[in-house]
Amino acid sequence: MKKTTFMVLALGLLLASCTQKPTEMENPLLSKFDTPYGVPPFDLIKVEHFVPAYLEAIKQHDLEIAAIVNNPEVPSFENTIEALEFSGKLLIQVDYTFNNLNASLTSDEMQKVAQEVAPLLSKHYDDVSLNVKLFQKVKAVYEQKAEFELTPEQSRLLEVKYKNFERGGANLDPEKQAKLRTINEELSLLNLQFGNNILAETNNYKLVIENEADLAGLPESVIMTASETAKEAGLEGKWVFTTHKPSMLPFLTYAKNRELRKELHTAYIMRGDNNNENDNKKVLSRIAALSAEKSHLFGFKNYSEYVLDVNMAKNPETVFDFLNKVWDAALPIAKKEAAELQKMIDREGGKFKLAHWDWWYYSEKLRKQKYDLDEEMLRPYFVKNNVRDGAFEVATKLWGIKFVERTDIPKYHPDVEVFEVQNPDGTFLGILYMDWYPRESKVGGAWMDAYRKQSEGISPVITTNFNYTMPSGDKPALLSLDEVTTTFHEFGHALHGLLSNCKYHSLSGTSVARDFVELPSQIMENWALEPEVLQMYAKHYETGEVMPQELIDKISNSGLFNKGFTVVEYTSAALLDMNWYTINEVVEHDATQFENDVMANIGMIPEIIVRYRSPYFGHIFGGGYSSGYYSYQWAQVLDADAFSVFKEKGLFDQETAKSFRDNVLSRGNTEPAMDLYKKYRGMEPQLDAFLERNGLK
C-alpha cells in the first residue's frame, strides 16, 4: 500500500477560479460521476481539470466547516462530529482520483499539478486542524461523551476525531501552530520531490546489450522480453534491461556475465544517489530533520514516538526489541548462507569474493542443486490470469463473493482489468481495478488504494497495482513465485477495502493502525502456496496440466531456502527506518554516512544490501510508512498466528472465515486493532509461530 501527497497555487489563480461555478467550468470532477457504479469517468477527465477542481472542492469544504463552526446550537455528536465526518466529500472525490492517477499514469503535467496543489492542501488541512472554534466544539462533545447515547462505532469516531485534532496541533500555542504550518508545507513538497526523483532515476537507466554472448544463461523468455523492451525504446536488434524488478531480477538470477550483473544491480541501489538533479540525499535528510522538529512541537523526543503513539506497538522501544530479536535470529543464518554460496564459487574456480550482485545468481544455482528447483520450472504454471482467478476462487470459497469481469466500465489504461464484485446472492458489493504491467508513467512496486472507500450506503471502488512482465510473443504473462505471493498480498488489501462494513468513511476499510493494516494482505499469502490451492490455479500455459505433485513438494521442501537473506534484507531496512526517525535532534545528517553507520552498528554483512537504501526508500520518505516499515514483519507475526487457526480447522473452514471477516476485514478502525485481533483469535499473537515459519527457531 502506498499514499501519495499533493498540493499548491498562486493567489491570482485561486481568486479567479473561486469565482467560477462548477457548471461554468464543465468539469467532470465536480459533479456526481455519471458512470456505472459511480467510478471515475476516466475518458472525460483531463489534466487541466484537476487544479480548478481542487480549488472549488476546497472552497466548498471551507463553507461546510464554516457552517459547523457558526451553528448556534449546542455542540452535539450529530451537528459537530458527524457533520465534520460528512464534510469534504467533493474534495475526497477529487483527491482520490488525482492521487491514484498520478501514481498509475503520471506525466510532467500531472507532476506539475501535484507540485502546485501540495502546499494548498497542506494549508487547507492545517486550517481545519488548527481552527480554534471548531476544536472547541469537538472538545465540548468529547468531554461530554458520557451524556450522549453513542453506539460503539460513534464512540470510536469521536475518539479518533478528537485525537486527530490533538495530533494536528489544535492544542499547541499560536507560535507552535505557525511553525507546524511551515513544517507541513515544506514536508509536502519534499515528499513529492523524493518520489518524483525515484521515478526519474528508474526511468533514466537502461542496460543496453549489443553482444548476444552477454545474454548467456538467460532463459529464452527473458531474452525475448528484453528484445521487445529494446524495440519499444527504438533500439531494435539489441536487448534492454532496466531497474524495474521484473526486468532486473531475472538478469541477476541467470546472467553468467558477472560484470553486467554488477552494473545493473549497482544502478538499482544507486538510484537517488548519483549527485545529479535527481539526488535524494539532501531531500531525505531534510525530511528526517523536519520530522524530528515536528515531533518536538507535540512534546515527543523524536518522530518515531509521535508515529507509534497510535500504533499497536505504541513506542520505539517495543519495535526495536521486536526487530532486534528477529535480527539476532536471522543474521547467523544469513552468514551461513553466504558461506555456502562462497564455497560454490570456490568449487567452480571463481577467484572472487561473493558480492551483492552475485547472491541471486548463486543462490538460484544452489537451490537447483539442493532441490532440483528453479524459477523457470515454476513460471510456466503461473499464468497471470490463472493466479488472479486462483485468488478470486480462494475468496469465493471463504466468503462466497464472486468476481465478474466488466468491459463496459471506464478505465484509465488499456492494460487495466475491471471486475464487479458481488455478494453471495449476486447483489453488488464493489468494483475492483487491477493494473498489471510496468510503464514509465507508473510508480514501481505493488500497492492497493481506493478511488472510493466504503461507508454506509456507499460501495467501494478499489484498485490494485503491479509491475509484472508483460506477455511476450505467444506467451501469456508468466509470474515468478514472488509475484504470485505479491498478487495474493495486494488482493488481501483489496478484500480489506471491499468487505468493509462501516458506517463512517474515515473508519472504514484500510484506515487502521499502520502495523495492523498488513494483516489482511499477509494472511492471504498463506493460501497462495498451499498444495490444495496450487492445484486450483497452477496450470501449465501450454498444456493446461495442473502442477504435478512432485513440483509442489519441491516448493514445500525448499520453503526455508534463502530465508536468512530474505529476513536480513528486510529487517535491515526496518531498522534503517527506525534509526532515521528516532533522531532526537533537529540535524540534517549526511545520508550516506548515517546509513553506513546504521548498517555497521547492526553488523550487516557486505554480501547483502539493505532492501531499500535511504535515497530510494519511498516507503518512509513520502510513502506514509515512516517508523512503520517494521509493520510488514509485525503483521507476519499476526498472520502466522491467525492462519494457524485455518491450518487447524481447515483452509476453508466457514466458521473461521466468518470470524475473520466479522472481526477484522469488515471492521476497519471501529475498535483498537488489538481488541479486534483478540476477538478473532481469543488471545494476543505470539512470536513463536513467526519464528518457526521462517526457520528462525
Image: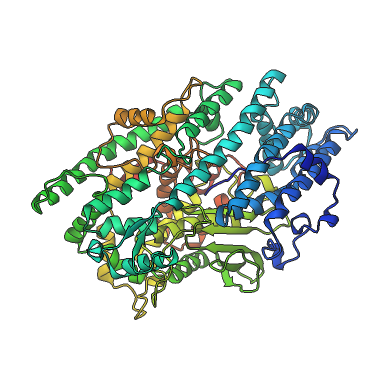
- Relative to 131, is 188 on the left or the right? left
The tally of labels here is 0
Q: State whether residue 227 is above or below residue 464.
A: below
- Relative to 141, is 199 on the left or the right? left
Colour scheme used in the picture? rainbow
Q: Quadrant of the C terminus?
A: top left
Q: Residue at x 83, y 53 (%)?
A: 22
Q: Is residue 453 visible?
A: no
Front residue of 410 and 151: 410
Q: Is residue 28 visible?
A: yes
- Relative to 143, is 107 on the left or the right? left
Q: Quadrant of residue 593?
A: top left
| Image spot of residue 665 (x, y percent) | 56, 53
Front residue of 380 and 596: 596
Q: State whether residue 108 is above or below residue 420.
A: above
| Image spot of residue 205 (x, y percent) | 40, 52
Q: Quadrant of residue 463?
A: bottom right
Identity of the residue furthest to the right in this view: 72
| Image spot of residue 51 (x, y percent) | 72, 48
Q: State whether residue 346 is above or below residue 653.
A: above
Q: Quadrant of residue 535?
A: bottom left
| Image spot of residue 14 (x, y percent) | 78, 41
Q: State whether residue 547 is above or below residue 260.
A: below
